[in-house]
Amino acid sequence: MRRLLFLPVICLAMLGISCGGGQTAAGNTPPEATDAPLAGSQPAFPVDSLLPGEDIDSSGNVLVNRNAVASAIGSADEFLPGVDFMESSGLADKNGVAATMQAAPGGSAWLVHRFTLGGQQPGVVSVDVNLLPGVNAASYYVGVANFDSSRWEWHGPFMDSHVRIPLDPQDSHLSGLGNAWTAVLGYDDVSFDVVGVSVSPASGGDAQAPDAVTGLNATAVSGGAELVWNDNAEGDLAGYAIYWSDRSFINPHSAGVNRLPYLEGTTRHQLDLLPGSYFIAVSALDVNGNEGSPSGLEQVEVTGQPAAGLVVTVGSSFSEIGEQLELNVSGAELYDIDFDGDGSFEISDGSDSQYMMQASGAGILRARVRGHDADGSHVALGGLSVLVTIANLPPFAELELEHASIAPGQSIRMSAVNSQDLDGVIDTFEWDFDGDGSFDDDTGSTPFTSHTYTEPGYYDVEMRVTDEDGDSSSAFATLTVRGASSILIAETGSNSKLQLQSVDGKPALFFINGANSRLWYMRAMDERGEDWPNPTKIYDSSDVGAALRVQDVDGNPAVAFRSSGLDRLLYMRASDADGSTWGTPIQIGAAGLGNAIDMEIINGNPAVLTQNNSQDELWYYRSSNATGTAWNPGVKLYDSPVSGHTPQLYATNGGPSASFLQVAPMLNWYGVEADDADGIAWKAPVIAGDDTIDDGNWFDSVATGPGFLACYTADTDSSNQLRIAYLSETLPSDYWGEPRIVSQGGTPRIAKIGIMNGLPFIVYEDFSTWPKRLIYVGARDVYGYEWDPQVVLLEHGTDYVEQLAVLGTDERVIFAYKAEGENFIVLGTVYK
């Protein structure tokens, strides 16, 4: 096999690696996290999501698919090489298993790793980092994501090549998907290799502490103390805590006692100490945070200063079992060599500069070197980490797409050029373009391919690499082909009103069937809205007219609608959160209401804004309780011919606000504000749009950020425009900000606005083309200042869209529409 050689180099001050590093006051186990310096950037706190190729178990945790080739502490560890990171900043190179990081002067460099633990809390994080030579005061930090506080826990600074950090079992270090996240961070001109990061899962319920450490011996050396103790052979041992003070102590966690800010993994350590008298103790900790009794105290008298530097290099950071590696040393007179890191030196007082060591066991091999002079007064400990595998190491797969999003019919180039096989060569590259598990293309040893996608959708692309030994690994990437997919979801008659609403976490569709004038309801069986049951009739007592509005009222869905058979505005609330059963309809106000309706929660109670059937009055009603079983007398907001169309009610702070259309003598929209929190009294409406043109047709609005955003069409002399305007929620108000143009040209017609992951979007019809088109456009900010390029969702024939509804879920935008002349409702999913 072709062998790749890498040369991680560690330059050690005589008390550098495997020495004390930082010194912190001791507290409760584990050591308290610190704040990382503020210079330079830091990784954002992780937002976990399901990755392509991953599945979840019945508890909602990502299924564990172990591909660890080594462990840092035990066989149950989850290990990731440095190069297998999720995010990075300051990446200088990928050297085999290691990722070389370089922080600019005054800046930072960092790597973030994600560990799939299947919901099992991590107990210890283990990190192998080689600080590269030539940088003064080089150090690094280790971060662990705390999902209780939604902050990084930073530990450090460290100068040692290997640190083990015990985690507080009282905190949750797991995301909602059962994953742990770590970070390695360096500041201000530091350069370092991240060889690997490992997480040791805790085994819940284990309260048995390790045995007390025995055989501690502390020897004073120049500028420090050399410590040796007996091995604690317990299977779940995480490492050893080291304590020291200038006075005798019994409790290692008492005030004035210092503690090494990480766990020592071997039975030998060297503390960097100022001249003086010290008492030292060592205790053992397991991966569950249980700490054994401390050893007996050892007292040393430290004098002198550290000596010159020690340099240790190894021929390769990767090896298979049975192979030999060159260990090169310099900077000291004599050397003691511990090849396997078990605390015992296989070579003592060696004077050679090169030694051959056998990779005899799988895992992280940490050879340790003790450099010293002839009388043993000047001593330094150093070491390096080597990744040892049982047999052939599977290749690393990395997939890059030319674009993250393309249009239908567009070809996209895919690259796997950064994939590598550390112990050989990659024989084949295979490509699954649609994520169905079947590989569509085999490009042999060529790490490139192209593919053309014709249908909109989200595609999980898989690229599989196979080495000459037959071992394989896969990389995944998600590609968006912009547009929309659609299905027929329900039959209906003409002029059927639609509204999409999230009901108990799943999309739901309410509609009036124009064929039988009845109110129907259907709720998706999944959060994405991909699987739907047959609709259910929820009101059958009289004919239902052409007005409908849905709202979440005290945890259950509620609907306000006009009964044309009774000539009444009715309100009906479900008896449960998912809308399985519905209560008795309640009449709101007098006869002749409900030609147009909006519903909102005002000061804790449901309220409606409604146009009368003569289209010349606008009324406001608010329930006297939180569930809408009784309603207060109404308040007339406006009284003028052809007014009150498209009413919109807003829950502004301190009281409600509203808007509506008046269609003659010129179409325009008005704003109006209440005088009190409940809307008992209102001010006179004022024109909110442009009174020189037809302004405000197809008006719709949505709550966004600290206010509300409305979309509507405006007919100017030069063009037809799709506009938006913003209303602050700070106070009841009739003032909308200056309008902004989202689109001009064509003929924007029916338009609906929604929210997806906190950002507004609009779906509208362009009536100027043949066939007619539905178009999606998304905002880049909550105020609608900037908008992304438009995406054509679909072309739906010659008839215009009669009804349209939209809904933003956690993962995608869905829409429902009915075209004029067609007797069915179409449900679509947006891919953008």
Image (spheres, rainbow, N blue to C red):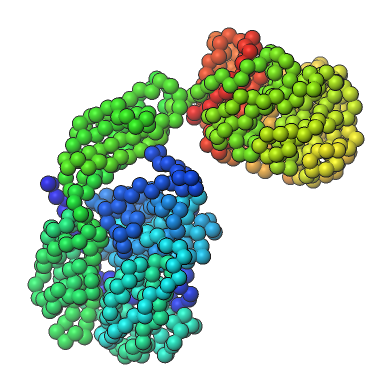
Left-right relation of 351 to 560: left
Q: What residue is drawn where x is 80% and y is 20%? A: 542
Indicate whether 748 appears above or below 161: above
What residue sits 67% from the left and 25% below the top? 536
Identify which residue is drawn at 23% across, 74% down: 343
Side of 810 where 335 appears, left or right: left
Where is residue 6, by image quadrant?
bottom left
Res 350 quadrant in image: bottom left
The count of marks equals 0
* Residue 444 x %, y %: 20, 31
Query: Can residue 787 be seen from the camera position used here?
Result: no
Give coordinates of residue 529: x percent, y percent: 56, 31
Choose between 232 and 198: the one closer to the eye.
232
Q: In this rendering, is residue 125 above or below 726?
A: below
Which x, y percent locates residue 753?
Answer: 64, 29
Q: Specify whether residue 116 is in view.
A: yes
Q: Position of residue 197 (x, y in %)?
A: 34, 58
Can you name the residue that lies furthest to the left here?
A: 352
Task: Name the foreground residue: 230 vs 790.
Answer: 230
- Residue at 64% in and 9% down: 821
Classify 734 as above or below 240: above
Which image quadrant is residue 625 in? top right
Q: Give the camera-side residue of 84 and 713.
A: 84
Q: Is residue 185 above or below residue 813?
A: below
